[in-house]
Image (tube, rainbow, N blue to C red):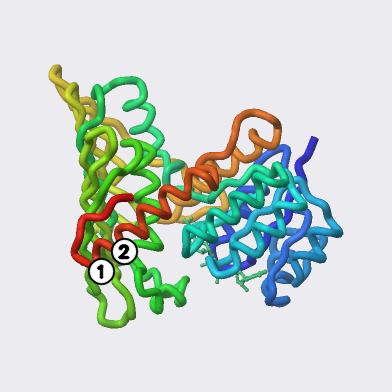
Amino acid sequence: MTHRGVLIGCGFFARNHMAAWAELEGVEIVAVCDTDAAKAAAYARDFGIARWGTDAAALLAEIRPDFVDIATTVGSHRALVELAAGHARLVICQKPFAETVEDAAAMVAACAETGAMLAVHENFRWQRPIREVKALVRAGAIGVPRWLRLSFRHGYDIYANQPYLAGVRDLALTDIGLHLFDMVRDLMGDIDRLSCEVQRRNPRVAGFDAFQALLRHHSGAVSTVECSFHSVLSPDPFPQSLLQIEGDGGSIEVTAGFRLRLHRAEGVEERDVEPPCPVWGERPWHLIQDSVLAFQRQAVAALDGCGTVEPSGAHNLGTLAAVLAAIRAAERGTVERV
Ligand code: NAD
């Protein structure tokens, strides 16, 4: 059985969603929607989709899809998720899920009421190096994880494809910080308290394009998470997240160039964790593009009745709460409980 989907938001990033849906078996995007007719029509043409429209409510009522993939920017998420909850078995929403916990909780409640599964498109935890680290940690390769450093620093011009980012006040925390906090929660468990410092590094942007956060987890583990969009590095590791995680029985490092090293008392094992470049992909975006494919693959499995989609909207409430706590901590110079 082929699951029928509608994609809403035909902008820069959703081209990756569309290419990945086309590659996956058992699923088909049957209509695309954008308030900008020219963008919806361009997607329909480029991806061979028969139906396109500008009014999501009318399109969903007509198509009655199995799933809705929302790839718009954050301001439209609540209205679209609440709408989709009444029309589909699975609703996927791009990050940032919401700007406030109130909006996020309303979306979770709307889907709970209709019984629709709700997932947030947090693809970073689905990146191949991160999945390999998680598998090693879950298998006990380093013992109980006690400390982590996660670093996303680059000088790639992100404003060329996403010009709206230059006007976002808490840019680094709400754009990539959400991904990083989701990865840290996935690897180290929930966050108890945190402190955070932000910086405006690039004089051409309005917001804080760098942050450094110090996290204490409920387990007692400690993590440091950092991000900068204005670092001069050669070669530039964009869009790789570099990581070091320590347990009492060993450590794992992921370094630039997709090298994973597992350190244990008996020595170090090194391997290449670079993902393949999809046929529709291009470097250096293949890391992200492969993770979109992995994220969407589990969505197809969930539609088939096998498991849920990670992370759920309910889980993402905790990630949003952590990022909002980091914004408060940076503003006030305090340690904030999450
Ligand atoms: P974009 O502005 O290029 O595209 C968004 C599109 O949504 C626009 O074409 C806009 O017209 C349309 N839209 C807005 N409201 C709508 C509505 N109510 N109904 C129908 N269409 C509507 O933005 P983008 O750069 O593609 O980013 C979209 C989202 O994806 C953002 O939330 C961004 O944070 C996220 N994103 C995620 C990743 C990732 O790796 N997960 C990467 C880049 C962007």
Tag 2: amino acid: Ile
Q: Which quarter of the rendering shows the N terminus? A: top right
Residue at the image position 41 percent from the left and 39 percent from the top: 128
* Residue 296 can be seen, yes or no: yes
| Image position, residue 280 (x, y; %) | 57, 53
| Ligand 1 is within 8 Å of the C-beta of the residue at disc 2 | no
Q: How many marks?
A: 2
Task: Give the residue number, with chain letter if any, for mark 2.
Answer: 327
Task: Give the residue number, with chain letter if any, for mark 1.
Answer: 331
In the rendered structure, the answer to whether residue 182 lies left or right of residue 312 reads left
Q: Quadrant of residue 173?
A: bottom left
**76 is higher (above) or lower (below) than 287:** below
Q: CA distance from mark 1 to mark 2?
A: 6 Å
| Image position, residue 122 (x, y; %) | 48, 49
| Image position, residue 37 (x, y; %) | 73, 76
Tag 1: amino acid: Glu
